[in-house]
Image: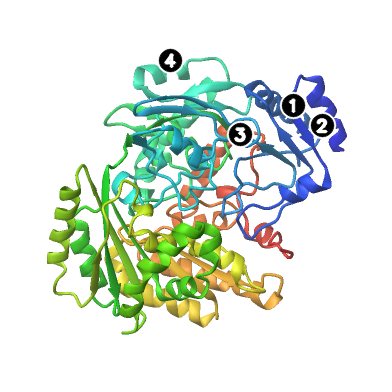
């Protein structure tokens, strides 16, 4: 079916948003921050919820004649797993769904296309703590659909803990409120003679009928973005049924979020950073255990390759920071330059503490400093600022946060290939695990940096490759298999934050087994029986399809 027919049908049904099938638009929306490319046939930019409902209803009707029709939601397009691209129709929430509806102390309501940076500026003395490293580029809608986490997840957890209510367009094209329900409220929903009632009834029966299996399948790591969060939906002990937990992290494969309510936490008044330069990592497991007993706000780290690249591309920071902050960065790096004459450390660890007063923060850092005295590492206590990125600690946060951006823009003839970019194992395994990961990287001659969340054991390993070269493309599958096997050997998860999409969806059966993945697919079918939403992602991903859509031109 030609897209002109779809456009005419949308207009006839009252769609008032933009319809764009220009070559320029289709090319722009054909890729996100992943290594994949899917060329869409049409881009919709709905102006309001009625437009979203209309789009879903029209595509549901037309899909009977054209099974290849589908809709994929997109906001900022920063997804690294390939979830925000589609060969059929893209629904752009970035253009018009940009309103912050209300902010009242620790509660805020917003549309999904709002940039996190704008949302964060509007929430005043409160903070949504689950922001990702791409916080300057990401949207809040993407954070919900990916179940985002980041440096503050160690203390506060992921997005799934901060979304008490959603407005959600189901596959029948009707927007409804989704929130936690008591068993009595659930019974009322299940008694409804409509599509909503059917979804609640069938999802409850699926989860309750496989309750023990589903609960046992939950990964035993501090954060996970793989599969559907079936284990968080129905709790027999509390008798709470929370369908928001099914939608958060579903990557738009079940329906469309049109509005999110967020719980916020008080923004820390003061912070300080303890930096450790680790020349050996034999005692890393014990060191992490010691650090964690002090309950830090964040515990980040990056490897020697990240440090060396940051130094090599130091002039690039002038563009990122501007002249004043760049000069400040150079001045504050001088003491560390002398330290590095002793040799490049294998890991730079950053332990941040927050508190109501400077004295409180200083006390926390001093206590940890004392407890770590037996380790041969160099410590640096940094400033106590309202914003830690503006103080003495800025140099370390810059290296940690901007390393990926530098890699992407500065290494000639190679491109970021995020395919082993978000693994997580429990921290006690890191002394054994990290050298084995390095060996795999070395075996396949991958140019890659390692950075991540030390307290969680969640690492981002983003190789740079010539993906247009068949020899480099041939490395993807065997390298991914080896990494996955290693992660699962240590009972980890293939994704702590970045989700499944096209890249990790094909390996869910390896992680969970066929029985659980069949339950994931059954849940998808309950919400989306016609498979209108975001095909080839998560539990319905298949490596042959994904591999055939790796970008060849950059």
Q: Is residue 148 visible?
A: yes
User: How far apart in space, not on screen, are marks 3 and 2 (Cα)?
Assistant: 20 Å
Instruction: Report whether 378 appears left or right of 68.
Output: left
Q: Percent from the top left, x then y, of residue 302?
A: 39, 67
Secondary element at tag 4: helix
Q: CA distance from mark 4 to mark 1?
A: 29 Å
* Callout 1 touching callout 2 (CB < 8 Å): yes
Please state which of the two labelled residues, at mark 1 or mark 3, is closer to the viewer. Answer: 1
Say how the picture is coloured. rainbow
Q: Residue at x 34, y 29 (%)?
A: 106
Q: CA distance from mark 1 to mark 3?
A: 15 Å
Label whose residue precedes the other's in the sequence (1 or 3): 1
Image location (x, y in percent) of residue 480: 53, 68
First in sequence, mark 4 or 2: give its number. 2
Which residue, given by chain and number where applicable, does mark 4 sit on?
188
What's the mark number on residue 58? 1
Return the residue nearer the eye: 223 or 45: 45
Q: Nearer the viewer, mark 4 or mark 2?
A: 2
Residue located at (51% from left, 73% from top): 448
Q: Is residue 170 depicted above or below 307 in this figure?
A: above
Quick check: 317 above or below 165?
below
| Labelled pair 3, 2 in contact (Cβ < 8 Å) | no
Instruction: Count neighbours of disc 4 (C-alpha within 10 A) and say few if under 14, some if 14 to 19, many if 20 or more.
Output: some
Quadrant hosting residue 99:
top right
Q: CA distance from mark 1 to mark 2?
A: 8 Å
Label at residue 528: 3
Quadrant where the N terminus lies?
A: top right
Task: Report how far apart the C-alphas of labels 3 and 4 lie in the structure.
Answer: 22 Å
Q: Earlier in the sequence, mark 3 or mark 4?
A: 4
Return the residue nearer the eye: 11 or 392.
Answer: 392
Residues at badges 3 and 4 in contact (C-beta under 8 Å)? no
Location of mark 2 (residue): 6
């Amino acid at each position: 079916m030609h897209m002109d027919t779809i456009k005419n049908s949308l207009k006839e049904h009252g769609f008032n948003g933009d319809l764009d099938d220009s070559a320029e638009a289709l090319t722009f929306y054909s890729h996100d921050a992943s290594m994949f490319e899917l060329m869409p046939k049409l881009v919709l930019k709905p102006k309001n919820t009625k437009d979203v409902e209309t789009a879903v209803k029209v595509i549901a009707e037309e899909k009977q004649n054209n099974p290849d029709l589908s809709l994929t939601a997109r906001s900022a397009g920063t997804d690294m797993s390939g979830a925000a691209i589609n060969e059929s129709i893209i629904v752009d929430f970035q253009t018009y769904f940009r309103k912050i509806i209300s902010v009242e102390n620790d509660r805020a309501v917003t549309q999904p296309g709002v940039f996190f940076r704008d949302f964060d500026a509007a929430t005043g003395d409160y903070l949504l703590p689950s922001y990702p490293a791409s916080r300057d580029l990401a949207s809040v809608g993407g954070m919900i659909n990916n179940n985002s986490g980041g440096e503050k997840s160690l203390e506060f957890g992921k997005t799934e803990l901060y979304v008490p209510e959603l407005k959600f367009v189901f596959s029948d094209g009707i927007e409804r409120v989704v929130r936690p329900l008591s068993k009595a409220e659930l019974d009322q929903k299940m008694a409804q003679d409509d599509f909503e009632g059917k979804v609640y009834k069938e999802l409850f029966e699926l989860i309750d009928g496989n309750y023990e299996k589903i609960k046992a399948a939950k990964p035993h790591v501090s954060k996970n973005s793989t599969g559907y969060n079936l284990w968080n939906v129905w709790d027999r002990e509390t008798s709470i049924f929370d369908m928001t937990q099914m939608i958060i992290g579903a990557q738009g494969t079940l329906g469309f979020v049109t509005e999110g309510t967020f719980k916020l936490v008080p923004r820390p008044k003061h912070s300080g950073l303890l930096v450790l330069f680790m020349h050996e990592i034999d005692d890393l497991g014990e060191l992490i255990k010691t650090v964690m007993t002090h309950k830090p706000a964040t515990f980040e780290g990056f490897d020697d390759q990240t440090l060396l690249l940051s130094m090599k591309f130091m002039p690039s920071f002038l563009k990122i920071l501007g002249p004043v902050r760049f000069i400040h960065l150079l001045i504050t790096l001088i003491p560390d330059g002398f330290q590095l004459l002793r040799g490049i450390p294998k890991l730079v660890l950053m332990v941040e503490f927050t508190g109501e007063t400077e004295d409180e923060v200083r006390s926390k850092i001093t206590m940890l400093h004392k407890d770590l005295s037996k380790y041969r590492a160099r410590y640096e206590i940094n400033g106590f600022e309202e914003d830690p990125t503006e103080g003495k600690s800025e140099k370390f946060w810059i290296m940690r946060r901007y390393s990926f951006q530098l890699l992407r823009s500065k290494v000639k003839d190679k491109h970021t290939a995020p395919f082993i970019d978000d693994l997580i194992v429990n921290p006690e395994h890191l002394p054994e695990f990290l050298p084995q990961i390095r060996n795999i990287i070395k075996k396949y001659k991958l140019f890659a940096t390692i950075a991540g969340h030390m307290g969680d054991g969640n690492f981002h390993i983003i190789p740079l490759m010539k993906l247009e070269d068949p020899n480099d493309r041939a490395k993807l599958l065997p390298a991914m298999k080896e990494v996955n096997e290693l992660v699962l050997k240590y009972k980890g998860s293939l994704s702590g934050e970045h989700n499944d999409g096209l890249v990790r969806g094909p390996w869910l059966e390896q992680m969970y087994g066929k029985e659980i993945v069949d339950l994931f697919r059954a849940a998808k079918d309950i919400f989306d029986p016609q498979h209108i939403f975001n095909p080839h992602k998560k539990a319905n991903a298949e490596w042959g399809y994904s591999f055939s859509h790796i970008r060849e031109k950059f």
